[in-house]
Structures are given as structure tokens and as C-alpha cells.
Image: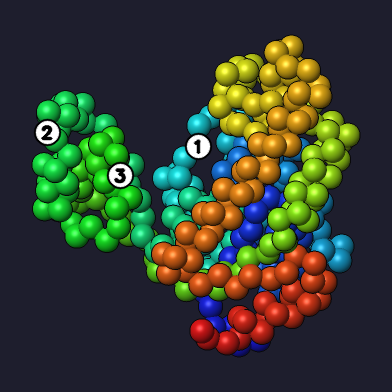
Amino acid sequence: MDIKYDMLTILGPTAGGKTSLAAKMAFILDGEIISADSRQVYRGMDLGTGKDLEDYIVEGKQIPYHLIDIVDAGYKYNVYEYQKDFLKVYVELQKREKYPVLCGGSGMYLEAVLKGYKLVPVPANENLRNELEEKDTRELTAILKSFKKLHNTSDIDSRKRLIRAIEIEMYYDESKDIDDYFPKINSLIVGVKYDRNSRRKRISERLKQRLDDGMIDEVKRIIETGVSPEILIYYGLEYKYLTQYILGKITYDEMFKQLETAIHQFAKRQMTWFRGMERRGFKIHWLDGFASMNEKTERIVELLQSVD
């Protein structure tokens, strides 16, 4: 197969069937999956993060996957660590001549990799922040413009963001030896989506199934290992509402309704992020979620062998 891309990326909102499609494509391409999910990195957080590990078995073959179950629950993993870990896996797959299939719905993780440059964690500079707080917005904007051309207004839509943007630029300016290398990866990006009503129905059905499968017991076990309820609530969505239910702060019906609404809102935010990626220049080839697996894989293979 004459593939024109370095990597295949499959993205989409939650409960869209990304994992099974990615596994099937990895099977076809003799590849391995790199997860781009900010919560599936945690061990023991399985049902709540929708790992669907059974989806990685295709025609009796276990498809290797990476960046799942790599840190303990309670740890606050971040996008900087993800980029570092992604790069290690990507380079290793290249050495073994295995085709990388990036799969997930965490927009920040996906974009941080697909942008082709490495973000560097910039420490807080309290002295600088205090100094900048004395200046008005016009002065702050002028300072930021002295470091870079402003292509959009995202850095200046609030004083807090403006001060942080200046803090980052000053850190880069003073740290000339920063290793910010990240390879430019030419990836085909494929999205899977359903119409709004169908997406909502799939989310609700999936939530009921995961509760039936023991998601509440999973959260209880995590708490029993010593992870504080506050940390679980920090992880949001399933872990936030199930923890509140276990602590007796809300009833089962309240938990279900609030969690269902929160997941619907989360899926909407995911789609908003993906549309933002398209505005920022990423070409996403959207596939109808209702198409058969064969139709989806045939279309992806066709796209992999062509150039936009």
C-alpha cells in the first residue's frame, strides 16, 4: 500500500466508535495505536474513562496500544508530559516500522502533537506577574507585541491570559537553550461524528451500560486505594458525579441526570474544539458514524493513498 502520510489520526467526540475504527485500521496497516485521551492514562480508571479495551482485539489479534494505564490515579498528568511520552512512542514505532494510529478525543493533546512543535512547561514568575499587574491592558498588549506578531486575540482576551502570554515569551527569550524540537508529522486526520440527537442517544445508552458494568464499584475501589475524593472530583465527569453520589451528597437519580447532562455538554465542547482546529488550518475528513466498518476503512485507505 502506497501511503502518503506519516500517521493516521482518528478523532471525534465521546461515544463515537473511534477506538474500534482505530483498531481495525491498525490491523489493516500493521500498526499500533497511540492514545490521545487525557484520562485514559490513569491505571484503574477504566469504565469511567471508557477505555473499551476489548475493542483492541481485531479478528482474534491483540492490537498494541500506548499511553493508556501509564500513571497512577491521583497523579495530575499534563499536556507537556503527554508530548514527551508521545514522541518516545512515535520514534520507537518508526524504528520497528509499525504504522502509528493516533486515536482520541482530547483536543489539546491531539493539537499539541499535530501542530508539529513542542510546548515547554513555563514556570510561574511571581515577581514578573506583580510587576505586570501594575500596567494597563494597552501597555501589556504592546509588551506582548514586542515579542511576537499577534495572529489572533486569544492571548489578549483577558488580563490573566495576557500576563501569562508575556511570562511565557520572556521565559523563551531568556532561555535560549530550550529543547523545543518536535518533528513535523504529516498526518491524515479523520473524524467520526453523528448528528446531535444520535450522539446524545449513544452517550445515554453508553452511560447506562457502564453503570451496569460496575462503574460505581470502580470509583469505590479507587477511593479505597487512598485517592482522595477531592482528586477524583478534579478529574470531572464520571468521577466527579459518582464520587458525590458515593459520599451521599446527591441521590442516584440526581447523579445520573447531572452526569448525563455533563457528558452531553462535554461532547459538544469536543466538537467545538474540532471545529476550531479546522479554522486553524487542520483538514479533518469527517466520516458518518452510521457508515459500516468496511465503508469507513475503505474510505480511510483511499485517503491515505491520496494527497490533499
Residue at horizontal 54 percent and vertical 59 percent from the top: 274
Q: Nearer the viewer, residue 145 or 72?
A: 145
Disc with the residue nearer the chain's start (1 vs 3) = 1
Q: Residue at x 71, y 30 (%)?
A: 258
Closer to the camera in the image, 107 or 222 = 107
Amino acid carrying mark 2 in the image: Lys
**Residue at 11 percent of width and 53 percent of height:** 146
Colouring:
rainbow
The residue under label 1 is 77
Q: Quadrant of residue 286?
A: bottom right
The image shows residue 129, relative to residue 28, as above or below, that is above
Q: Residues within 10 Å of mark 3 (few under 14, many from 20)?
A: few
Tag 3: residue type? Asp
Q: Which residue is mark 2?
A: 135
* CA–CA distance in space, label 2 to label 3: 16 Å
Q: Position of residue 213 (x, y in %)?
A: 87, 35
